[in-house]
Amino acid sequence: MKIPTNTSLKGFSLAVSLLALALNASAGTAPTIQECATCSITDAAVSAVNGKLDFHYGSVNDTYTRGVGGALSLPVGKSFGVQIDGLYARAAESDIYGYGAHFFTRRPSKGLLGLAAGGLNSTDFTDFVVGVEGEYYLDKITLGAFVGYNHFDNHFPQPLLGGRLANETNFVAARVYAAIYPIDDLVIRIGYENRFERNFYTAHLEYQTPVAGLALFADGALGDNSFYSLVGGVRYYFGAKKSLKARHRQDDPESLPGANLPTSIAGGQGGSAPAAAPANNET
């Protein structure tokens, strides 16, 4: 098992401590789910029961991916929320099934702090992460992070990217990002991820159209071992009519399996690293 670095351990410990403080601060008499459905969206962790469904198509390294994902979010009292994620994708001639769960506390005017766990499974790999997620809200900017434990089991004997030449490997996974809202229905998000001890740089663009609940999105990424991905799609939000920024801050956190899908595919297929140089057989 890979031993986490001191920096990673300190960051994880800090996140857990902040979560404990937030949970303690928000303790008290909370309304029921039915009561919270009508409580003020300015202070509820989740404004009301809501969901989303999306379809994607794109390329990860030298293989195409297409699939469908979704999430259901609901309030647990006034101060807490839960979300369940689901995903199906077809990539590299394999079926990929994803799942995830979030439990969090949030103030829509301040930020979010919670626990998240999820994974992706296929005939090529098993990928599982669990950790702490958080967001801090400014007027037109959201700052976010995730840090936790990542177990990646590559079913190939010598994977190049995800498994680092080992079938079962454990890592610290981390993600930081900044999301900018030029207008309330448009978000541009840039981020950095570290998984499998590799570096990935990501970009996300999403626009909510004038059709209520309908949004278009595109995701791109570059990283170590010549990694690249470019994926686009359409997303539909179920729930009250509101701006895209309000949906992100009052309703659903980002889907965990959806966020990890491109790097999981690359890890499962060994990435696009250069082939090892042939042995010198000259005499």
Image (cartoon, rainbow, N blue to C red):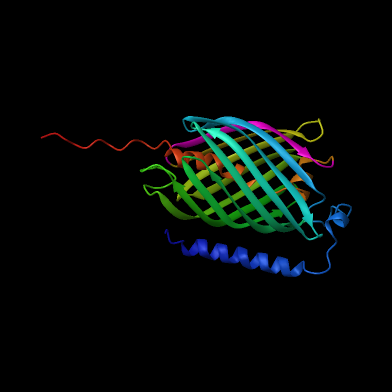
Of residue 119 and residue 190, the one placed in the foreground of this image is: 119
Q: Main secondary structure of the magenta part?
A: strand
Q: Is residue 254 visible?
A: no
Which residue occupies the extreme left position in the image? 283
Q: Residue at x 86, y 52 (%)?
A: 37
Residue 246: image location, x then y, percent: 79, 45
Q: Residue placed at 21% from the left, 37% from the top?
A: 279
Residue nearest the observer in this picture, 84 or 227: 84
Residue 56 found in image quarter: top right
Q: Quadrant of residue 33?
A: bottom right
Tell me if I can see residue 35 in this picture: yes
169 horizontally vs 128: left or right: left
Q: Position of residue 88 (x, y in %)?
A: 60, 37
Residue 228 on the magenta segment: yes
Q: Is residue 147 left or right of residue 155?
A: right
Please report the bounds of the magenta region as a residue range: 225-240
Point out residue 253 in the picture as x, y percentages from the top left corner.
69, 49
**Magenta-drawn stretch contains 195:** no
Name the image quarter holding the N terminus: bottom left
In the image, 189 versus 115, the foreground residue is 115
Q: Is residue 193 left or right of residue 183?
A: left
| Residue 55 at x, y percent in the picture | 66, 32
From the image, which quarter does the C terminus lie in?
top left
- The structure residue drawn at horizontal position 71% and vertical position 66%, both measured from the top left corner, is 22
